[in-house]
């Protein structure tokens, strides 16, 4: 897998494979420290690449119906499935993940693309969408207004985070390509290899029209300068980078539509009155441990704050810590290892620095430093054990509601009343998801209504659906992903709702006869 002189990964732009200039940036194995590949976007003619995607890719995609584009996605799914083993090898080497964690990214991405292939079939032979029914503009029904949604004539630029090189691409590309909009993806540099390889496989298989899918690996320099008014940016990453993108002149001056999925201080809430020997208590404990350990806590949706009734603080601390103590951490190639590596030594430093900040206002309930690494050299590997923090005075804490430590770290917070718990959760300033643990359907419904305005998703777990639930942190394509405020204010997925970002809405005011004519070619969705 590794070589002494790692190869420079090719970019695919303007319908051809192109090498960037210079030595590029080295991608490393975060466990072994070895070099794997290099990436460079230096010297690429971005204006040419964007124009090619916009003009050739966009035109070819828009000439197809939703059903035809859905078939194209289904063909891409087959290509990806055929190469799945290679993707797992790349993920182990470049992301340091166990096979289970790699599967969440690789199989999760393929599943989401397949979901949009199936959804697209339901839109039939239409090439645009009718948004609701026509409305009269006056008393006389002869003159009416009909909203329509047509694919934008721009390109969709995806700037993605390092933690989901597969899913991050396909959860966006599914809706974009189904909508008829060409895609240029810029993966995060640290883990760009998997994205690049998947694009290469799909492009080489010839299942998409030329210009429909491009990849630029390496620096983001110049990418935003290439944007034009009908283009779109879908960004996933930190709030700091999101702010830079939003204020870029090409975005602000041309009203380029931007979707942001940023970081989030997600919470888990154990219902008041829960008993420590109950099934509900066990469900919370199990989920917190799963969330802390899956992908070593490098998920934007991971539980960061755990709210429990004050009288259960000690019991929860003990139960979560006891489970964390059993987690083996280290080289994901060792079959006994449950939790692999962080994505890089840089991330390890960032996690340690974040932990040090949170430690200033919390107690250490379970120390990740106590985990001996399995088959990994602590001087080289970016592995870190899970750490549970806690404070008995959450109202005095500030950083636990502000600092996202993107690793296996969570903080336990006791609450005295439900109102206090809800107010504490809202101190996250808008999150992707909160989960609620209760066996009382009325409590769940009431809490969900309270939490909905500050969360993109509320995930409620009760014993009756314990074996069926999809997990706090797992993003399912049928449900909305995104959150207000701190979480970026974006919306992704949610079934066919995702297509809205890639379409432009326009109102046609015309005679009833003309609107009837128009309606015959579109697929009506609920208004
Ligand atoms: P990041 O540093 O913000 O980087 C994200 C992407 O932006 C990378 O592709 C990066 O490229 C690129 N980038 C950096 N500077 C840029 C600039 N000036 N202009 C344009 N692009 C630029 O975030 P990260 O460290 O990769 O990801 C971790 C963060 O993402 C966490 O905070 C996590 O919560 C968040 N996240 C959110 C979601 C969600 O769905 N809400 C999902 C996953 C992760 P380089 O890699 O080349 O620097």
Image (tube, rainbow, N blue to C red):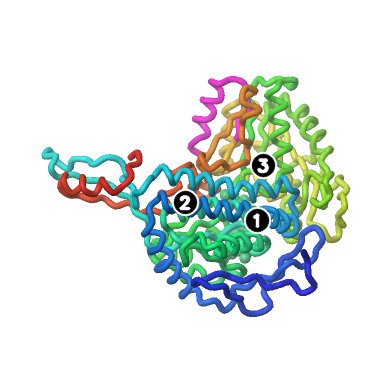
Q: In this view, does 447 lie to the left or right of 516?
A: right
List x then y, in percent, for residue 314: 77, 28
Magenta stretch contains residue 24: no
Whichever of labels 1 and 3 marks the residue nearer the N terminus, that label is 1
Residue in the image at 59% along x and 26% along y: 418
Reply above or below: 494 against 331: above
Residue in the image at 76% along x and 51% along y: 356
Residue behind label 2 places its C-beta within 8 angstroms of ligand 1: no
Whichever of labels 2 and 3 marks the residue nearer the N terminus, that label is 2
Q: Quadrant of residue 89?
A: bottom right
Query: For numbered disc 1, what is the local secondary structure?
Result: loop
- Which of the two marks, 1 or 3, is nearer to us in this view? 1
- Which label is found at residue 304? 3
List x then y, in percent, for residue 78: 57, 52
Residue in the image at 62% along x and 48% along y: 300
Mark 1 Cα-neighbour bin, 10 Å: few <14, some 14–19, many ≥20 = few
Residue identifier under label 2: 71
Residue 405 visible in the shown view: no
Q: Is residue 306 left or right of residue 375?
A: left
Residue identifier under label 1: 83
Cα separation, mark 2 vs mark 3, equals 40 Å
Q: In which quarter of the image is residue 203?
A: bottom right
Q: Is residue 223 left or right of residue 264?
A: left
Residue extent of the magenta highlight: 435-454
Circles 2 and 1, Cβ within 8 Å, touching? The answer is no
- Which of the two marks, 2 or 3, is nearer to us in this view? 2
Query: For numbered disc 2, what is the local secondary structure?
Result: helix
Residue behind label 3 places its C-beta within 8 angstroms of ligand 1: no
User: Closer to the camera, 253 or 456?
Assistant: 456
Reply above or below: 403 against 62: above
Q: Classify the position of ligand 1 by quadrant: top left, top right, bottom left or bottom right.
A: bottom right
Reply above or below: 414 against 384: above
């Amino acid at each position: 897998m590794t070589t002494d002189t790692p190869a420079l990964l090719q970019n695919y732009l303007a319908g051809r494979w192109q090498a960037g200039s210079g030595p590029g940036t080295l991608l490393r194995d975060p466990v072994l420290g070895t070099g794997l590949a290099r990436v460079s976007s230096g010297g690429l003619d971005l204006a040419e690449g964007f124009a090619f995607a916009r003009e050739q890719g966009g035109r070819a995609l828009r000439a197809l119906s939703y059903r035809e584009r859905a078939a194209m996605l289904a063909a891409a799914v087959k290509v990806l499935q055929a190469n799945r083993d290679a993707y797992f090898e790349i993920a182990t080497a470049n992301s340091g993940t166990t096979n289970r964690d790699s599967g969440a990214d690789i199989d999760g991405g393929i599943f989401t693309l397949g979901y949009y292939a199936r959804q697209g079939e339901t839109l039939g032979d239409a090439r645009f969408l009718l948004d609701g029914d026509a409305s009269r503009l006056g008393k006389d029904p002869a003159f009416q207004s009909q909203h329509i949604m047509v694919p934008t004539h721009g390109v969709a630029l995806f700037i993605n985070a390092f933690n989901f090189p597969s899913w991050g691409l396909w959860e966006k590309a599914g809706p974009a390509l189904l909508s008829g909009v060409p895609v240029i993806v810029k993966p995060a540099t640290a883990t760009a290899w998997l994205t690049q390889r998947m694009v290469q496989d799909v492009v080489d298989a010839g299942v998409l029209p030329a210009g429909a899918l491009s990849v630029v690996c390496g620096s983001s320099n110049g990418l935003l300068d290439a944007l034009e008014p009908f283009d779109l940016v879908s960004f996933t990453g930190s709030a700091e980078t999101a702010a830079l993108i939003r204020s870029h002149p090409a975005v602000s001056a041309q009203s380029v539509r931007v979707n942001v999925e940023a970081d989030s201080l997600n919470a888990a809430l154990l219902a008041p009155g829960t008993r420590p020997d109950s099934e509900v208590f066990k469900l919370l404990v199990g989920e917190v441990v799963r969330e802390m350990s899956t992908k070593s806590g490098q998920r934007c949706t991971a539980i960061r704050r755990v709210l429990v009734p004050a009288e259960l603080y000690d019991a929860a601390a003990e139960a979560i810590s006891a489970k964390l103590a059993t987690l083996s951490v280290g080289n994901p190639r060792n079959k006994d290892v449950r939790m692999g590596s962080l994505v890089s030594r840089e991330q390890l430093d960032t996690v340690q620095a974040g932990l040090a900040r949170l430690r200033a206002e919390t107690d250490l309930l379970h120390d990740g430093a106590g985990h001996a690494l399995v088959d990994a050299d602590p001087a080289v590997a970016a592995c870190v054990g899970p750490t549970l923090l806690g404070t008995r005075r959450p109202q005095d804490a500030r950083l636990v509601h502000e600092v996202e430590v993107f690793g296996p770290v969570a903080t336990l917070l006791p609450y005295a009343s439900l109102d206090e718990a809800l107010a504490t959760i809202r101190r996250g300033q808008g999150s992707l998801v909160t989960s609620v643990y209760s066996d009382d359907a009325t409590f769940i419904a009431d809490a969900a209504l309270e939490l909905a305005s500050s969360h993109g998703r509320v995930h409620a777990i009760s014993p009756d659906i314990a074996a069926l639930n999809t997990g706090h942190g797992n993003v399912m394509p049928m449900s909305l992903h995104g959150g207000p405020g701190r979480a970026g204010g974006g919306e992704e997925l949610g079934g066919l709702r995702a297509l809205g970002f890639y379409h432009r809405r326009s109102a046609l005011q015309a005679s009833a006869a003309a609107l009837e004519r128009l309606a015959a070619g579109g697929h009506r969705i609920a208004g």
